[in-house]
């Protein structure tokens, strides 16, 4: 998708906003959430990740006009109203308005927007509800450019709104999703390589641990600092570091964080090879190793996530499972034989399919 080949079809009927004049045609923008199959806590050091956009998405429907970006939401009790000039996006209220303010602060739209947000992406579950919101909003506000440019803009919006130095994975997966494919992303070159996940051969199930979390309440920023310390100790990027360089890091905690990153990058590479060969069991085994590394070396798992992964590892037809996203709560992702797991048998679980990226409808 590029700015010129995005399909822009604006409907003639206008929605009514109680406080806004009816100023233009209705805009409908949709952006998917994502699940990460493998490669967590590697994007902010320019490493490798393998997410897929999912068929859970955020839709913004509204009308351009006025001097404010004002949005109501099915999921939120209080609507948000952001002026076109934003000083501090992280100070916006209610809390979900931080992401709206972040997008407005980086996109600088010349006119406002009144609309409504509806979403099937669960909030604070690690499925990138905030990225889906930012990406859908940027499109609704008239962004035009490549999926990478859209993702970069929305990553800056997320960083400003949340105050957390998160990487580009979530926004790029939402912007650049490809139907039927996971995305191997090199977060240094931004090269995106779609890898097929054939329907009927393999299935992806996401299961909520029951623990909600937001990045700004987590130790995410501390982990990014520990990676920076590791790079300082090594004298070069973690992206190209060897295990023997990692072994030489004096601080044991920083060393363990670096070990996760270096081994995780290698696992993503092997995972991509396994997917291309249709070796689902080998791919699943790498997911379990990734979980163990995130638990032991990166220390972002929780007892609830560990318990779910243990349960899934012994379930027939499950190739592998791991926590997905930042951790500290949220969801587990499982790669399975079709029909092996019934989402209905968990409190909150979804069978997700690799989906196309964000677009205007
Ligand atoms: C969050 C961040 C991403 C990435 C993951 C961990 O989802 O937004 O940039 O760092 O955590 O892999």
Image (cartoon, rainbow, N blue to C red):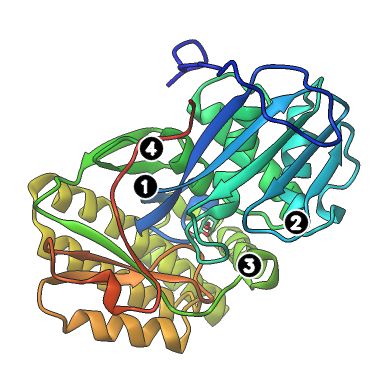
Describe residue 310's horizontal placement relative to residue 278 as left or right.
right
Q: Is residue 296 visible?
A: no
| Disc nearest the viewer among 3 and 2 | 3
| Disc nearest the viewer among 3 and 1 | 1
> According to the image, label 2 marks what residue?
163
Q: Is residue 337 above or below residue 166?
A: below
Q: Which mark is residue 177?
A: 4
Secondary structure category for the residue under label 1:
strand
Describe residue 110's horizontal placement relative to residue 289 as left or right.
right
Describe residue 242's horizontal placement relative to residue 238 as left or right.
left
**62 or 68: nearer the eye?**
62
> According to the image, label 3 marks what residue?
214
Q: Position of residue 8 (x, y in %)?
A: 51, 16
Q: Is residue 53 above or below residue 4?
A: below
How much space separates mark 4 and mark 1, taking CA atoms? 10 Å
Label 4: how many residues lie within 10 Å, few (<14), some (14-19) or many (20+)?
many
| Disc nearest the viewer among 2 and 1 | 1
How much space separates mark 4 and mark 2, taking CA atoms? 26 Å
Callouts 3 and 1 close, C-beta under 8 Å: no
| Mark 3 or mark 2: whose residue is earlier in sequence | 2
- Residue at 37%, 47% (x, y): give it: 55
Q: Which mark is residue 55?
A: 1
> Assess mark 2: CB under 8 A from ligand 1?
no
**229 or 13: nearer the eye?**
13
């Amino acid at each position: 998708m590029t700015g010129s080949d995005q399909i822009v079809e604006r409907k003639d009927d206008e929605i009514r906003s109680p406080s806004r004049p009816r100023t233009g045609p209705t805009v409908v923008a949709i952006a998917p959430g994502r699940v990460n199959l493998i490669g967590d806590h590697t994007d902010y050091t320019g490493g490798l990740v393998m997410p897929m956009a999912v068929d859970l998405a955020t839709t913004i429907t509204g009308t351009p006009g006025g001097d404010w970006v004002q949005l109501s939401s099915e999921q939120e009790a209080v609507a948000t109203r952001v002026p076109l000039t934003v000083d501090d996006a992280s100070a916006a209220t209610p809390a979900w308005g931080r992401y709206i303010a972040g997008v407005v602060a980086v996109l600088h739209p010349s006119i406002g927007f009144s609309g409504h947000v509806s979403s099937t992406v669960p909030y604070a579950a690690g499925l990138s509800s905030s990225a889906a919101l930012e990406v859908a909003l940027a499109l609704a506000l008239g962004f035009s450019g490549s999926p990478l440019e859209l993702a970069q803009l929305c990553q800056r919006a997320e960083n400003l709104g949340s105050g957390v130095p998160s990487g580009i994975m979530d926004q790029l997966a939402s912007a650049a999703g490809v139907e039927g494919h996971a995305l191997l992303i090199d977060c240094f070159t931004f090269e995106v390589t779609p890898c097929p996940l054939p329907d009927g051969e393999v299935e992806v199930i996401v299961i909520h641990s029951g623990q909600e979390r937001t990045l700004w309440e987590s130790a995410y920023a501390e982990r990014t600092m520990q990676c920076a310390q590791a790079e300082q100790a090594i004298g070069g990027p973690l992206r190209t570091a060897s295990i023997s360089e990692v072994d030489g890091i004096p601080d044991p905690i920083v060393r363990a964080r670096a070990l996760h990153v270096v081994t995780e990058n290698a696992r993503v590479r092997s995972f991509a090879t396994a997917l291309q060969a249709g070796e689902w069991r080998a791919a699943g085994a790498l997911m379990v190793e990734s979980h163990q590394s995130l638990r032991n070396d990166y220390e972002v798992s929780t007892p609830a996530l560990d318990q779910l992964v243990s349960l899934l590892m012994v379930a027939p037809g499950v190739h592998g499972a791991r926590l997905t996203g930042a951790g500290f709560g949220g969801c587990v992702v499982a790669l399975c034989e079709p029909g092996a797991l019934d989402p209905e048998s968990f409190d909150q679980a979804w069978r997700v399919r690799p989906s196309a990226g964000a677009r205007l409808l």
